[in-house]
């Protein structure tokens, strides 16, 4: 027969086999820490090897129960002598030695149950446990703060509606941890039977309706109006209803667990609890004789039959106790229940919740205001920003108040420095730049108004520059003698000072007032017959004509035809200061002045006039919140709810950990005075300690 107890040191090296151990017992509750105990005579030298936190391997006959570690022990003396009793806990308790310091969050969409469990096991300082089989693939999000690893692990399947069971393998190191789904009775290979009068000595049934609940209100993280509920994921109501209300009526209870920070996870856990609470808890405690081949195992199905009491049920084993495998190896106590939670578990959970309230940060409601005042115009709106922290759990209110005021300045002049500008300049008049003026005008030049200009001048007429005039002409000579060059000589007039080398040529048809057929003398003798048409030349030498007598008038009937031509002139104009009297009309079309100029402004100073000077006041504004227009606002407003217009994330929540922007654009130059008030619930996490 195998010794019931073996001792291993911290390195899992065997240091003692306790052949003298007695009163060896164990307890195997479902999904909880198993416990064991044993005693040794006080004078047994192997007590020296039974040190705190050394490992203990328990055997029930030849069957290995599991691996435990030693926790407090006590010495006791009775009539039979002095003994030392050692209490042990399962090595799963080694996960109590490591903690998740401060805040940790993991899970959610895309991260499954096995990844969450692995994250927790990765926090071990000494990797004693590794992850084995995981039968679930949920995507719940979890948060922990200052939590030990075992408590974090046990919280992972709490939201599951399905029945689950923690199993493990401690026969190899590192030890392996599994999270599996409990099989249905038809698939359970460990189904056992208890029949009164056959293998059952006594049975006790307890029905406890005090824990019955058919309507469960679920509350998570936070407090007051900021406490998490399931309303947003449960059709707007914060409670769950059981399908047993017709049988038991509406029995409401409030369940609070501030470890839950997400409504989806909180609801899933509430559904699992309600499934257990919708019926009274029924517990069967039975003492049975161990028949050797038939074993009772935690989590397995048990069929209980007692014809005398009318008991015929099938339930799971939620706990197995064997108080003394050496003194009474056949005695076994089993607990069968329709749910594993008993009053002891309730008390433990209440204590755990109290601890959670002590170490889990809850946060507080915060009020914050942001004031703003500045000048603005349609192209330069008033812009104000406010921050929503990443740690914000809830946003209760965001209110905007504003009003418009006249534009405001504080001075009227500024100091000017010297300035020089040069280069070409073009100034464009507007369409109204031209104008028309008419009527008499008198302008007097100054003493320097006269001027003298000289030099060659050339002016060319256009193709229409020629003209023809005809009709009588009257010209009156003055009293003085006039000497001038003529364009012809001969015929009726005497020739004087003829110069044969000087020739003038006039081309074109013209008339000298000489009758056709007149004989005209030419130089050197002879004559020509005058013809008035056709091009011809006059050969003229230097000569002059003198006219004497009283002023007189020549009356002539003649025609002048002047072809387009060019006048070349070398001349001098002298204009004395004078006055022009004009009756005229000026029409000036819109035009551009091109100027190449340089302006130099000497250094000078303008005195500043200080004061508050007001300008125009806008008559309308446009308000945008994160780019979204808030409709229906005038030039002032109080307590405008802008939550619907704030930027949202993919889940429809107001974005956290970012700046939000409010723009107020007036329709003219003006001034905006505004205030934003926020009421938020902020968790006591993040940031430094300065």
Image (tube, rainbow, N blue to C red):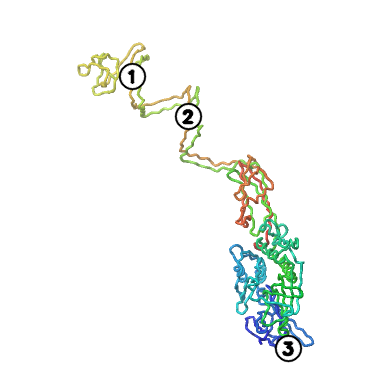
State the residue lying farthest toward the right: 79
- The residue identified by callout 1 is 560
- The residue identified by callout 3 is 43
For the N terminus, the image quarter is bottom right
For residue 671, above or below residue 314: above
For the C terminus, the image quarter is bottom right
First along the sequence among labels 1 and 2: 1
Rendering coords of residue 110 (x, y %) = 58, 63
Closer to the eye: label 3 or 1: 3
Secondary structure of the residue carrying numbered label 2: strand
Note whether residue 99 is visible: no
Secondary structure of the residue carrying numbered label 3: loop
Closer to the eye: label 2 or 3: 3
Viewer-side residue, 22 vs 281: 281
Rendering coords of residue 77 (x, y %) = 78, 85
| Circle number at residue 588 | 2
């Amino acid at each position: 027969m195998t010794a019931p107890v073996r001792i291993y040191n911290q390195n899992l090296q065997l240091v003692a086999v306790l052949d003298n151990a007695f009163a060896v017992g164990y307890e195997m509750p479902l999904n909880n820490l198993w416990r064991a105990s044993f005693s040794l005579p006080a004078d047994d030298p192997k007590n020296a090897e039974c040190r705190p936190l050394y490992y203990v391997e328990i055997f029930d006959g030849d069957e290995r129960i599991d691996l435990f570690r030693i926790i407090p022990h006590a010495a006791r003396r009775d009539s039979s002598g002095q003994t030392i009793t050692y209490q042990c806990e399962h090595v799963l308790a080694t996960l109590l030695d490591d903690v998740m310091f401060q805040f940790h969050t993991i899970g959610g969409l895309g991260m499954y149950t096995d990844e969450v469990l692995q994250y927790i096991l990765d926090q071990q300082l000494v990797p004693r446990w590794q992850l084995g089989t995981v039968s679930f693939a949920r995507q719940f999000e979890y948060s922990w703060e200052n939590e030990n690893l075992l408590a974090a692990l046990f919280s992972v399947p709490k939201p599951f509606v399905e029945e689950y069971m923690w199993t493990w393998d401690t026969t190899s190191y590192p030890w392996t941890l599994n999270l599996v789904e409990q099989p249905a009775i038809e698939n359970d290979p460990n189904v056992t039977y208890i029949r009164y009068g056959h293998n059952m000595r006594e049975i006790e049934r307890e029905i406890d309706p005090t824990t019955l609940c058919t309507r469960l209100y679920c509350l998570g993280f936070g407090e007051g109006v900021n406490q998490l509920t399931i309303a947003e994921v449960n059709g707007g109501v914060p409670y769950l209803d059981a399908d047993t209300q017709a049988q038991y009526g509406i029995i409401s209870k409030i369940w609070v667990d501030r470890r839950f920070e997400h409504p989806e996870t909180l609801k899933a856990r509430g559904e699992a609890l309600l499934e257990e609470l919708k019926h009274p808890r029924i517990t069967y405690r039975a003492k049975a004789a161990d028949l050797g081949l038939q074993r009772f195992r935690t989590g397995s199905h048990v069929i209980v039959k007692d014809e005398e009491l009318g008991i015929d049920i099938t339930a799971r084993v939620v706990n197995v106790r064997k108080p003394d495998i050496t003194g009474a190896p056949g005695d076994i106590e089993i607990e069968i229940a329709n749910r594993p939670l008993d009053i002891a578990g309730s008390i433990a959970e209440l204590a755990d919740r109290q601890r959670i309230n002590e170490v889990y940060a809850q946060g507080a409601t915060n009020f914050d205001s942001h004031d703003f005042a500045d000048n603005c115009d349609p192209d330069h709106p008033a812009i104000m920003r406010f921050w929503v922290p990443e740690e914000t759990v809830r946003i209760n209110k965001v209110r905007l108040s504003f009003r418009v005021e006249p534009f405001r300045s504080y001075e009227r002049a500024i100091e000017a420095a010297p300035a020089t500008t040069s280069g070409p300049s073009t100034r464009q008049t507007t369409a109204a730049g031209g104008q028309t003026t008419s009527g008499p005008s008198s302008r007097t030049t100054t003493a320097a108004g006269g001027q003298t200009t000289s030099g060659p001048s050339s002016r060319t007429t256009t193709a229409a520059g020629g003209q023809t005039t005809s009709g009588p002409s009257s010209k009156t000579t003055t009293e003085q003698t006039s000497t001038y060059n003529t364009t012809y000589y001969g015929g009726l007039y005497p020739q004087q000072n003829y110069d044969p080398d000087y020739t003038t040529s006039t081309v074109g048809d013209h008339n000298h007032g000489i009758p056709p057929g007149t004989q005209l003398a030419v130089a050197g003798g002879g004559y020509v017959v005058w013809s008035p048409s056709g091009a011809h030349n006059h050969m003229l030498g230097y000569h002059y004509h003198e006219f004497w007598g009283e002023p007189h008038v020549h009356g002539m009937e003649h025609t002048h035809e002047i072809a387009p031509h060019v006048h070349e002139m070398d001349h001098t104009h002298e204009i004395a200061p004078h006055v022009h009297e004009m009756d005229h009309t000026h029409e000036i079309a819109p035009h551009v002045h091109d100027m190449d100029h340089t302006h130099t402004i000497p250094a000078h100073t303008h005195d500043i006039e200080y004061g508050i000077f007001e300008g125009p006041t806008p008559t309308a504004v446009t308000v945008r919140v994160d780019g979204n227009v808030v409709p229906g606002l005038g030039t002032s407003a109080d307590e405008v709810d802008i939550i619907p217009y704030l930027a949202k994330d993919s889940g429809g929540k107001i974005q956290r950990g970012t700046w939000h922007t409010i723009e107020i654009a007036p329709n003219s130059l003006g001034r905006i005075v505004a205030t934003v008030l926020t009421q938020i619930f902020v968790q006591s996490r993040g940031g430094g300690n300065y």
